Image (spheres, rainbow, N blue to C red):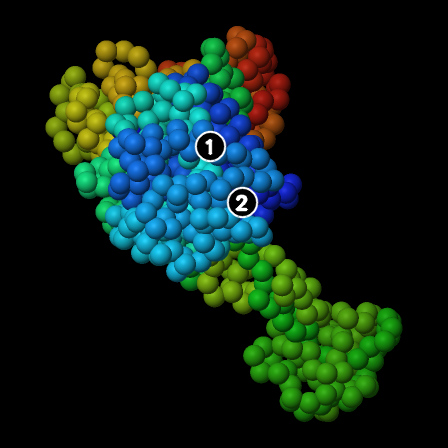
Amino acid sequence: MSLFDTHIMVDWSGGNDTGAKPRKDAIWICEAGQEPVYLRNRVLVEDWLNTRISAAVDAGERLCIGFDFAFGYPDGFCETVTGHKDPLALWAWLEERMKDAPEANSRFDIGAEINQLFDGIGPFWGNGLKRDIEGLPRKGNDRTGRAMPERRHVETLARGAFAVWQLSGAGAVGGQVLTGLPVLSRLRRQFAEHVSVWPFEKLDSSIAFVEIWPSLISAEIAEQATDPIKDAGQVRVIANVVARLDQADKLQTVLDSVPEESRREGWILGVGAEDIFRAAATARPDRLPSNCFALPPGVDWTPVDEALNLLHAAMRPVVAQEECPIADCGGRVLAEDICAVRSHPPAPNSAVDGYGFHLDEVSGKTVILPLMKGRSAAGVPFDSAVPNGQAVQVLTGAILPDGVNTVALQEDTVVSGNHITIQGPIKPGANTRDAGEDVRAGEVVLPKGRRMNGCDVGLLSAVGCDFAKVFGRLRIRVISTGDELRSPGEVAADHQVYDANGPMLARMAKNWGYEVSTVRVGDDRTAMRQAFTEAANETDAILTSGGASSGAEDHVSALLAEEGHISSWRVALKPGRPLALGQWQGVPIFGLPGNPVAAFVCAALFARPALSVMAGGAWLEPQGFWVPSGFAKRKKDGRREYLRARIAEDGRAEVFASEGSGRISGLSWATGLVELPHEGITVEPGDLVRFIPFASFDQ
Ligand code: AMP
Ligand code: MG
């Protein structure tokens, strides 16, 4: 189970106010799964953190907040300055002295003041001001006797990390430490029982401050960051990486990788556990935020449309991108807009078999023209020009030779000797196709997010594409739950039933374009926990059926409530109760009902559009048609209903004899669903009802 609900990373800056317009080398904050936030100065940052931490404390939310500056100094420093070994004593010491305003701060004077406490010049250097400051050299080499090691132990391992003593200059971290620690110290006092500082304290409260160093995964950041401003991309990637680490249950191991003797100096998250850290960095992109299925509190029965809107808002792509040859693109989702490499058709050509010539205006009469030798065929163009007043044979798809703007249909012509007689009337341009009349080179032919069908693949090939950037296939685990279930081929006693949902849901998810695997588990907490964990490690989304309500054997909802994140969605829908939406280690679980018809309806209505977004595609709205009803029904207010239906020979929608949600045969009898609105209505034969063909669900 993850240690934190939310992971927030802060890219600090020790400089002055950076102005209203977002820019680099400023302070950026990013919450995993959200957009980076630009803050122009530290006063605003402190406000932001205050508000965010307060909200988390009120909501019982666990926050991991990372800062990209050292939390401590080489061993012995703190004791010399404060008289105490506890590194947090230095935080308080600095808090008391640092004067920090958006346009100026006293970091250089503090550096000089601290230098006085050491033999020789002291460790700090890098006066970045115009005025000289006594005791703070401008250059590192001017320090005669710095009385402190140059680096913390962790910085000797983190190659390329700057030493904490340098207070100005490109990449210098010293100024960030002096301006950062006072802010953290204040926040820590403010939220005294709620904040722990790693690795100085045990992380036994709900908010943790940790030290990060984005350069640890600089290669991965360079590869994954797409924000135009580098700092924004950097905090975004590292926030998502830390969240992923946690969701994969690896954060504890990383936090524990601090040598005991270095604890008081502070440590960089991930150093000493680089393999684990980098593995999270190179893994697939962001998982969904852990609280994404939360329903507004106090909601009782949520109307279907509202539930769909909430689900839609919570979804985002979770798959990586890859290059795919056009021929294999069917069923794949485009990761970028595709532009035509060349025009279609590339050159003017003939739409028919016939004879080409030049025509200026509509000709009503019969024309006789000398016929040139040779012809223009598809793939074999005529290699000379056709003079005005002459004709040449052209076949379908052949390039129009120079001088030809019109083609007479073969059937409207008579060839005699070296002349041709063309039967009018005929218009200039007849039977020809212009270059680019279908698609012009450079035009967008298919948009990002499109799941490609056979026609799309044909189009891409026609306009000269050979590869397309597509999203990786979403991996789905279908889990059937229930002690009573048997798989096809197994012997089943009367108290046992064959697993219908597993094969049905697996086939549906394959039709949706995903890689699907199935398992079956009994009503057993341990087995289910293991199945969820395996699925979360191996796949992107989980579809379960059964065990989703609140009965004694409903282990799916119980387990998610206890150890995952769950929202039991009481959707006002028939058939469809109960639908449980939850997450296991960051992987969404669609807890579908056990009754096959309800499982089908919930999968088609909720899982299909949501998975499509996770796979990089669009939120899918099923397409329905209004048709006359062939049945009568009175429906009460307060829930939407779906009836198994088909279009009878008279063009009316007839419905299956039973509405029992266990009667799976009705799904095969039907060719679609009739959707009846949330409100109460009375349907009479002949009234228009909305019919959604099964083809709309790609089921
Ligand atoms: P549950 O939600 O687990 O209480 O299941 C509700 C009903 O659906 C029970 O009658 C189950 O036997 C049935 N059911 C659950 N899972 C399946 C399945 N995979 N295939 C067929 N029926 C199922
Ligand atoms: Mg069950």
Q: Amino acid at mark 2?
A: Gly
Q: Which residue is mark 1?
A: 97
Q: Which residue is mark 2?
A: 15
Seen in the image, is 285 located left or right of residue 673?
A: left
Quarter of the rendering containing residue 329? bottom left
10 Å crowding of disc 2: few (<14), some (14-19), many (20+): many
> Dot 1: what SS?
helix
Q: Under 8 Å from ligand 1: the CB of mark 2?
A: no
Q: Position of residue 552 (x, y in %)?
A: 23, 11
Q: Position of residue 74 (x, y in %)?
A: 29, 44
Pick the front one: 163 or 23? 163
Q: Amino acid at mark 1?
A: Arg
Q: Position of residue 465 (x, y in %)?
A: 51, 65
Labels 1 and 2: the sequence-earlier one = 2
Q: Quadrant of the C terminus?
A: top left
Question: What is the number of the mark on residue 622?
Answer: none
